[in-house]
Image: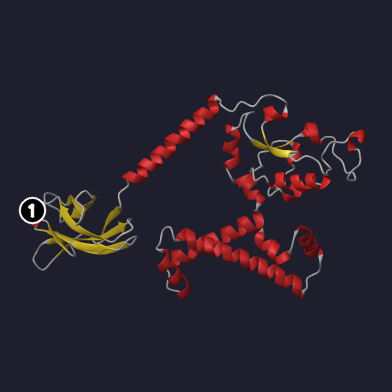
Amino acid sequence: MWCEKVTEGDRNQRIKLDKAPMSGNKFLRKLSKHSLWLLIGLVTGMTFVGYFSPIRELTIDFFTGEADGWSYFWVGFFTLATYGNAGWLREQVCIYMCPYARFQSVMFDKDTLIVSYDPRRGESRGPRKKGVDYKAQGLGDCIDCTMCVQVCPTGIDIRDGLQIECIGCAACIDACDSIMDKMDYPRGLISYTTEHNLSGQVTHKLRPRLIGYAVVLLTMIGLLVTAFFMRSLVGFDVSKDRVLYRENAEGRIENVYSLKIMNKDQRDHTYLLEASGLPDLKLQGKREIKVAAGEIFSQPVELSSAPEQLPSSTNEVKFTLKDADDDSVHVEAKSRFIGPQIR
């Protein structure tokens, strides 16, 4: 909406522009708006994909044509999704697609603070000149300027009462207060209030529903904080190569694995790699691995064992990764060691 205002002007200017025949000025304004929308969509797409792929490398590879096909697909997908949802669908996303209003409305009661219009003060609505005795004409404070409807991002009329489409942005409150100021009327015709307050009853601030929500929320926050402090600062993943096994020059059965180490800490770490689970198991490859802060490090390794030492054709092995400077930091990952069929 900001892009639209910058390129095409305010609401009245945009209405005039849309009704005007196509011209160079109109074409450039429309092109600028859609270009900005697509640019924001591209940044959104890059950011989202950057959660799953290192974003520094992704950005360079994307614009040099060296990124993989899936990166281009997902960046393009989220670019167009942002462009379509935010640029074209807009309030339709809030009304029909977003689940927020559905579960939020279930949590409401008559003591919940909501954006609401005061009909006792505003009705009957109607236009009038500033300074006239409108109450003698049977009118309320609402001058029926429709500013509250014009600024509403979902296009509803808050004067019709509480509606599921309302996202609680309070844009209608600001618009109405500005009109009240111009008319020298008290603010608050549209305000944050409760149904009990609107009907002249007392609003209960401390109530069982609110206490229950507070307990649930504090429990969730506590679990989140606990999970945050108990999380491992290193991620470790092992995947076996598609080749089942091979026999090396020494006559030993060999399996190949791909290791992925994620250093989630803010400083560099050196890790020590070990493997166990089979007698006479040998690990071939780099055992001491240095991973920079925030880096995802990948490395292939080989495990080998004498064929006569294998108890079966499919065996479980365990990889252990330890911090060279902190014995308390260690993670494990299990995999399979495949050998020939034992007769």
Vertical side of 306 occupied by 208: above or below: above
The residue lying toward the viewer, choosing from 306 and 146, is: 146
Q: Quadrant of residue 9?
A: bottom right
The residue lying toward the viewer, choosing from 294 and 298, is: 294
Give the residue type that dot 1 points to.
Gln
The residue lying toward the viewer, choosing from 93 and 40, is: 40
Instruction: Answer with left or right where residue 124 lies relative to residue 55.
Output: right
Count of marks overlaid on the render: 1
Name the residue at 60% across, 60% down.
Answer: 83
x%, y% of residue 251? 9, 64
- Quadrant for the N terminus in the image: bottom right
Name the residue at 66% across, 42% down.
Answer: 166
x%, y% of residue 154? 68, 47
Name the residue at 31% across, 44% down.
Answer: 230
x%, y% of residue 272? 19, 58
Q: Quadrant of residue 164?
A: top right
Q: Which residue does the numbered mark 1 point to in the structure image?
A: 309
Instruction: Answer with left or right where residue 330 lies relative to residue 151.
Output: left
Vertical side of 133 occupied by 257: above or below: below
Question: Please, what secondary structure does the residue beneath circle 1 have?
Answer: helix
Instruction: Answer with left or right where residue 308 lies relative to residue 136.
Output: left
Colouring of the image: secondary structure
Any part of residue 77 in sight = no
Instruction: Answer with left or right where residue 262 lies relative to residue 210.
Output: left
x%, y% of residue 80? 57, 61
Few, some or many residues within 10 Å of mark 1 (<14, 14–19, 20+)? few
The residue lying toward the viewer, choosing from 181 and 271, is: 181
Any part of residue 225 in sight = yes
